[in-house]
Image (cartoon, rainbow, N blue to C red):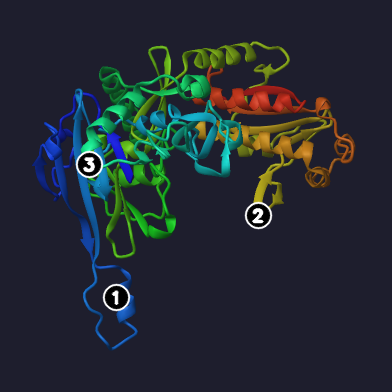
Amino acid sequence: MKLTTRLGKSGLKIKDLLKTNHGLQGPFKNWDKIEGSELYYGQSYGGEPSWKVFLESGTTEPIPELRNQGVAALLFIPIGNRYLIYMFGYGHSDLIEGKTEWDFGVKVVINTIKGDAIRSLDSKSLGRKAKTKRVQLGSQGSIAEFDLDIMNDLVSQISGVSVDTDFAKGIVGSESLMMTVDMDGSSIRKKSQQILKRYSLTTYKTNFEWIDFISPVKDRALIEKLDKELADKLSDAITNQDYDAFVISYPEIINDFAIDHVAYGGFGSFGEFDYPDISEFIDDYRKAGYLKLEHELDRLQMNLYDDTDTIKRPYSIYRSLSSELEYSGDYYVFSNGIWFKLDKSYYESVNKFFDKLIISTTEFDGTGQTFHGTEPPYLKHFASKGYEVLDQIFYKKAGEKIEMADIVGDNLEIVHVKAGTGSAKLSHLFNQGLVSARLMLNDVGFRQEFKKAIHDTKIRSVYNVKKFYPEEVTIVFRILKSGKKFKVPFFSKITLYDTYQKITAMGYKFRLDWVKIGL
């Protein structure tokens, strides 16, 4: 039998977990004589399929009534001061978002499998792109085979081979736990106790200790404080039309083919959009007459519609936003409606790296002259003997356009330039430099095109296509920003830290430049 279950947060009652407009029949209390249990069942949704009208347009014969219907059931089993919620059919759609433990299924799985017994893994990057990906192996393997950055990627689902087939044969974990088990209805109480015990174990620390580098915050008082900071930050972003402070994205992997458009709700919006985009949300909110945040975040919606203008998936804006905060000496990431705290030692090591970097006499230069302008005029008017501007010259590979560099020098400096210190801009800058450096080292075709793009014969002569020695080359990241002191957001420090390690590991020299922007 296949079971799918979620774990309600401590202290919540069934009325706190179940949507008020669920439409299911029930409750049927004390199911199988389990005191305090409740069963709900019925139709989760119903409607005419969108393709019926199209098929009718090509025939004079009437097509009988057709309806899509989703059956659903929810079985609430009390255990301690919380509930295990067994979901059948489309039952999950009748639960309130954010009321179950985000790491429940993942923790049960990693307490049940060996370190080299992973079959598939879903993750979401904590960067500005909020990249979601799924990696699936033909057999089973260790975490090293799943291209996971344990400091920047959040595991959202994992499956593997159970070491305890009495507990489960097949097992998949996300916010939900999906298991293949041998049981009948009379053993659900025992199975529930086994599941909760497995969730509480710490045996995962032997092979999966890294999962706690980014751990969910469960202190309710702290969550309330962080939520207040988040709302204030979004309000400022709306007021100032700051599109860099947040990312809005699908909270889970979505079949784009099934989605016709996205619309935001809860504030009188009439806009329709192809994909989630924070700039479109902010502009839409402002067009509705709100120049600051005037709604509760969990009351605002991001609705995904199909081609019949029917809501396919509704998500709260609260669950769809991603951002980050430094609060009381710690660093927090907000994603999928959950607050995560970065491992304290990692937080300190990133700050220590940055503080050391900006006092370095060889790897940081903040002594340059003040420039009055932004990136395009800086490059346009850049005039320095021994340098040439290559801005907007691209190398095309596998359909992708890759910017080679902004400035190159006869001293073997390859310079990448960006104005401003928003996380999105700096992530683009560091990624641009990293991709270019990697291709310069490993791709002869890139080196040929790079050299061909340089017009100055002296500069061109110092770059050898066939024999390339990275230790002779300096990769420079030049940031144009105002201020008396060089500061960047903590998330950008993380990206910088990662970029620095990868650039230097390839053998290159590294330098960070600060050009002050004058008023």
The amino acid type, in three-letter code, at marker 1 is Val
Image position, residue 200 (x, y; %): 34, 22
* Residue 366 location, quadrant: top right
Image position, residue 302 (x, y; %): 31, 46
Residue picked out by circle 2: 399
**Residue visible at 73% across and 41% down?**
390
Residue picked out by circle 1: 53
**Residue visible at 37% across and 33% down?**
167
Give how far apart the Cα atoms at labels 2 and 1 are.
38 Å
* Residue 290 location, quadrant: top left
Give how far apart the Cα atoms at labels 1 and 3 are.
43 Å
Residue picked out by circle 3: 185
Q: Is residue 488 above or below residue 123?
A: above
* Residue nearer the viewer, 173 or 156: 173
The amino acid type, in three-letter code, at marker 2 is Gly
* Residue 101 location, quadrant: top left
Q: Is residue 449 above or below residue 159?
A: below
Mark 3 or mark 2: which comes first in sequence? 3
235 with respect to 145 (left or right): left
The residue mark sitting in front, 2 or 1, is 1
Disc 1 is placed on an element classified as helix
The amino acid type, in three-letter code, at marker 3 is Gly
Cβ–Cβ below 8 Å for labels 1 and 3? Answer: no
| Residues packed near mark 1 inside 10 Å, few (<14), some (14 to 19) or many (20 plus) | few
Mark 2 or mark 1: which comes first in sequence? 1
Mark 1 or mark 3: which comes first in sequence? 1
